Every structure is written in C-alpha cells, then in structure tokens.
Amino acid sequence: MTADGNGVDGAGPLLRVDGIHTYYGKSHILNGVSLEVGDGEVVGLLGRNGVGKSTTLKAIVGLVRPSRGQVVFAGRPIAGVSPHRLARMGIGYVPEDRRVFRLLTVLENLRTGLDRHGVTKERKQELLDKVYAFFPVLAERRNQPGGTLSGGEQQMLAIARAMMLEPKIILLDEPTEGLMPRMVSQIREIIGVLHRERVAVLLVEQNVPLTLEASQRIYFIEKGEVRHHAKASELQVNDPVIHQYLGV
Amino acid sequence: METFLSFFHTVPLEQVVIQTVNGIVAGMILALVASGLTLIFGIMEVVNFAHGELFMLGAYVGVVTLAATGNFWLALVAATLLIALLGAVIHVTTLRPLLGRDPLTTILATFGLSLVLQNYALWQFGPVARKIQEPFTGQFTLFYLSYPWYRLVIAGLSAAIIAALYVFLKYGRYGIWIRATTQDRMMAEAMGIPVPWVLTGVFAIGSGMAAASGVLFGPLVGVNHAMGLDWVLKAFIVVVVGGMGNLGGSILAAIFISLLEAYASLWLSPAQAIIVSFVVLILTLLFRPTGLFVPTPK
C-alpha cells in the first residue's frame, strides 16, 4: 500500500509499517498490518475494540516484537531495535492508560525525556517553557506528583512528556478515553499544535468526529489488518465505510 | 507490680544510655547493608542472596588494600569501587539474561553465586579471620566505659552514605531514571531510558554499598569468609520489617531492631538477644506484612 496523502515526499514516508505480524501467546493479533505516515502528517487509525490498533502502536515503538514484517522509520529499519533507542531516534509514545510516573513530580516526569545526552541547558529550558506555554496547568503543578493530577491533566502530562523527546512522530493511543467533553476539545487543539510544529501523529481513537477532524488520512483496521484507507476530507461521520468498520 | 518495677530498677540508667548508643551504631551499619539490599529488591525485584558475600568480599578487598597501602580510607574507596564493578559484571552475566523469568530463577542464581563467592574467599584467604585496623584508636569515656570514637564515626559515615544515596535518587538525572524505572519499566523504556543499564547500575550501587559496610565494620568483627551470613540474614529481616523495597522503611527498621536487640541484651546474652529480631519479623509478617514503617496501603 502506498500513501497518496499529504506530506509523503520523494524521499519516502517518515514511518512505514510493512506487513507486520504479531502473536500474543498463540493468538494472532496483527495479521500483516501495513501503513505509512508522512513527515508532519496526522494519520488516524480507526477500528473496533481489540482489532489490534494498540498493538500496532506497541509494535512500532518496540514494546511488542513483530514476528514478521518490517517497520522503517526515517529510512532505517527499526523492527527489533530496543524501545529506548527508538525514543532517542524521535518516536514519542503516549499509551492508552497514559502511564505517567505517579510518584514522580510533573517536572520529574518531563525530565525523564529531557535528560538526554547532548541537550544543552538552554535547549532544555526552551522545551520546558514551550510545553508550559501549551499546558499552563502543568507549570502550576510542576512540583506535584503525577499521580495527584486529574485524568485530563495526566493526559496532558503524558503528551508533554513525549514532546520532551523532540520527536518526529508521536503515537497517541486513545487520548480522549474517559475525558470530559471540554478536555476532548483541548486534546483536539493539542493535536493541531503538534501538526503546526511539524510533528507527525499516528492517532488511535474511538472518537470518530475528532479523528476525522484532526487527521489528514485514516486507516481502518479489522481483525489485525488494514482493510481500508481514505483521505479524512472524503469521509463523513455517518459514512457507510465508518458503519462498516466501527458499527456505529 | 512491685516485682515488675524492681525488675527494671536492676538496670542502671548508664547501661541504658550505653545500649542506646550501641543500638544506634549497629543500626546505622545494618541500615547501610539493608539499603543496598532493599534498593536492589525495590527496583529490580531481585532478592539478592549474594549480598552478604559482596559485603564479605568488600571487607577482604579492604584487608588487602590496607596491607598494601596502609591507608584505611583508600581501602574503603577501593573496596567500594571494585565491588561495585564486580556487581556490574555479575548483573550483566548472571541476572540480565534472567530478566523477565520467574523470580525463583534469580533467587537460585544469586544463591549459587553466594556459594561460589564464599568458597572462593575460603580458598583464596583461608579460614583464619583477618583483622582490619581501624583508622584511629581514640576513645572517650562513657560513664564507666571507654568507648571507641571509631564506632561513632562508622555510624556517622553510614548515615552520610545513605544520605548521599537519597540525594542522588531524589535530585540526580540518574536518580530520576532509577525511580522512573522502578515505577514503570515499560514506560521508562519508551521515554528513552536505557533500562537494562539502569538495572546494572543499581546492582553496582547496591554492591558498592555492601562492600563499604564490610570495610567499615571489619575492624569490629574480623574478616572471614562467612562474615556475610549473619549480616545478610539480619539485613533481610530489616528489609521485610521495613517494607520490601522501601528505603526509608529499611533505615528505620534497622535502627528499631538494633535498638531492641541492644536493650534486650541488658537482660539476655547477646546471642539470645538476636531472638528479638526474629520475634519482630514474625509479628510483622503476621500483623503487618507490607512492613512496619510504610503507610497503610489503601
């Protein structure tokens, strides 16, 4: 499958997932998933629960090892590379349950991604100032343990933490899950900010309107494989395609 | 009631004060051994049965360096660094391949390692206990006793090393890496923290702390191949009573148990006084298995 969407330049896409298979014990979770994300592009991944959306993200960040298939990031094959190397290469990951470090303060959570070799003190401060400007509430709570934040604040922290890696792409796994409507629109804004910053986003969501609005292209995944692929601008919330793959 | 009070009157106040000092000194050394053990458990979930042998080998490195250079402080630093390095090698070769396996395999591996190290020491240094000369022999008068300054110095140094560990964990870059790894290994990886090396580093730090306590304590007990056994047993009790993996809890538990033992030996022989730690252990496991010095879990 080739991407005909925005942001895929002549040098090849930023991220290319090519026919990956994964097993969990004996059950076949991914059955040859292929997709592409271009530089600075926001791509949505839609599908019912348990079809392998989260596993696809985990396979990209190296937390699940694909038994077959290839993942290519910025021109380099990365299947089998350890997650911490991938993080340093510029893949940020915001997992489904946010997984902020609950006993670490907000600032310490951010420092886990910031304290890398080769980042100057000034650059660190710049990055911190930038996320504090996007998320003023994190600045207010910088010395509070991550576990004491509300769900929405933890989501912001998880995204801000991934931004500390200065990633080329952020994988967002159901960022609006369990959030109040007000927070959902804030997540929408954050994705817009990432897009403006030329950070690519691979977005796994259940929230169809948000996904259609925020993404340029959408992949539909069913039973561990990509079954359909379309430009977001060509889809509507009540599209038959969406009915077919999401049953809503 | 009368007889009960008279029982206490048989103990003069001076002795209580002396035993308090003894208890705190023993407690600080025990805390140093136990904090390495609890650090390794809390972060790596490895029950390190070879910890006592790292303590013992540290003391031997101290003996050898002291004999060669005559400088106690140099011996302390050399033992700490060398055993930390040994710890790193042990981790990479023995424990890292077992990552993600049943905890029983790491218990067996560290137990096997303890046997190897102990018998290596027996083969290399023989069964006769060696002595580490304390760096100064001054004494001060505590009531009717002349009390060696050195003991107070060990207590102070142990406290300083533990405080340094705390500051490192709390504020240092690698301290944050270590704490993040403890809380969520997978997410730490995803944030670019090289988790396998963090674990190796933690094992090295714990080993170095065991070695430092071996050298500090050497002058009081003599150094032989089996010296690790008593201490690691007590350190395990402390770690369980303090709440597995809880650094602050271990330190409090070390002082608490050592004080209890010191007071108990007002009436009992020191050998019998050890029973006290086991009683505390059993009561803790019965009534508060998460540890005495941790907040009640919700």
Image (cartoon, coloured by chain):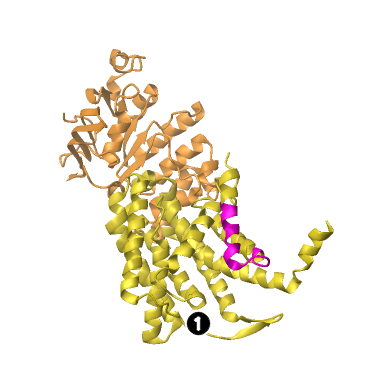
Q: Pinpoint residue A240: horizontal percent, then vertical percent.
A: 29, 12
Q: Is residue A216 magenta?
A: no
- The segment highlighted magenta reads B264-281
Between residues A39 and B97, which one lies in front from this camera angle? Answer: B97
The chain to which mark 1 is attached is B
At x 67%, y 73%, the residue is: B18
Quadrant of the rendered structure where residue B48 is? Answer: bottom left
Q: Given the current orientation, which residue lies at the most extreme right position?
A: B2
Q: Pinpoint residue B52: horizontal percent, then vertical percent.
A: 42, 64
Between residues B33 and B275, which one lies in front from this camera angle? Answer: B275
At x 66%, y 68%, the residue is: B20
**Three-letter amino acid code of the residue under disc 1:** Glu
Quadrant of the rendered structure where residue B55 is? Answer: bottom left
Count the marks: how many? 1
Question: Crowdedness of circle 1 by 10 Å Cα count: few (<14), some, many (20+)?
Answer: some
At x 37%, y 60%, the residue is: B201
| Chain letter tied to yellow | B
Note whether residue B289 is visible. yes
Compared across the picture, whether A46 is left or right of B286 comes to left
Quarter of the image for the C terminus of chain B: give it. Answer: top right
Q: Is residue A248 above or below residue A86?
A: above
Magenta: main secondary structure equals helix
Q: Is residue B264 above or below residue A108?
A: below
Q: Pinpoint residue A119: horizontal percent, then vertical percent.
A: 35, 58
Q: Which residue is mark 1?
A: B134
Note whether residue B247 is visible. no
Compared across the picture, whether B56 is left or right of B154 comes to left
Between residues B186 and B111, which one lies in front from this camera angle? Answer: B111
Compared across the picture, whether B228 is left or right of B200 comes to right
Q: Pinpoint residue B219: horizontal percent, then vertical percent.
A: 49, 78
| Chain letter tied to orange | A
